[in-house]
Amino acid sequence: MRRIAVSWVILGLAALLVVFAPINLQPVTSSAERVFRIEAGDFAYSPAVLHVNPGDRVTIELASSDVVHGIYVDGYDVSVMVDPGQPASLSFIANRPGTFRLRCSVTCGALHPFMTGKLQVGSNLLLWRSIGLAFVALLGVYFLRKPALMTEP
Ligand SMILES: [Cu+2]
């Protein structure tokens, strides 16, 4: 009984560590020039996911293949609109690490609210913490199985 209580405490501490450890995974502060050509059309962006390093200068060249679209970068508060056949671009310095939503800034049709993308600046800490937490949970399942199960012949 005491052993199980100790295991719970250890697992709890491990989970807290995984979730709250102040990991600074942003040593890659580059200042590279990153240019993305994004095609907007059919209520989607292509590519829809952009990965950059903190400090990069990001340029998005947007082109539309059907109607008037736009792109708005959450957290950076920059946007641009495009007419079909007339590409337009926007630039900003990706100085904030994290995951930011990209969304169409022009009401372009029925599926407009679903026209989104993602800007990932730096590594995806949330993802790694989730994986770590899943691992701790697995350890918990393994070590805290009912003793009856372990003593079965
Ligand atoms: Cu749109």
Image (cartoon, rainbow, N blue to C red):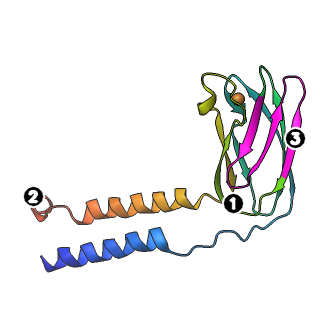
Looking at numbered disc 3 in the image, what kind of residue is underneath it? Ser
- What amino acid is labelled 2 in the image? Glu
Residue drawn where x is 32% and y is 72% of the image: 12
The single residue placed furthest to the front in the displayed view is 107
- Looking at marks 1 and 3 on the same chain, the residue that comes earlier in the sequence is marked by 3
On screen, residue 65 versus residue 23, left or right, reads right
Q: Where is mark 2, residue-wise? A: 152
Instruction: Provide the residue designation for mark 3.
Output: 89
Residue that badge 1 annotates: 122
Q: Position of residue 19 (x, y in %)?
A: 46, 68
- Front position among marks 1 and 3: 3
Image quarter where the N terminus lies is bottom left
**Magenta segment range?**
69-91
Q: Is residue 113 left or right of residue 66?
A: left
Q: Earlier in the sequence, mark 1 or mark 2?
A: 1
* Main secondary structure along the magenta-highlighted residues: strand
Q: Is residue 43 above or below residue 128?
A: above
Type of amino acid under label 1: Gly
- Answer whether residue 73 is magenta in the image: yes
Task: Residue 108 in the image: state x and y as whole percent.
Answer: 70, 25
- Closer-to-camera residue (131/152): 131
User: Magenta stretch: residue 78 in it?
Assistant: yes
- SS label for mark 1: loop
Mark 3–mark 2 distance (CA, rounded to whole Å) = 67 Å
Viewed as shown, does residue 72 lie left or right of 110? right
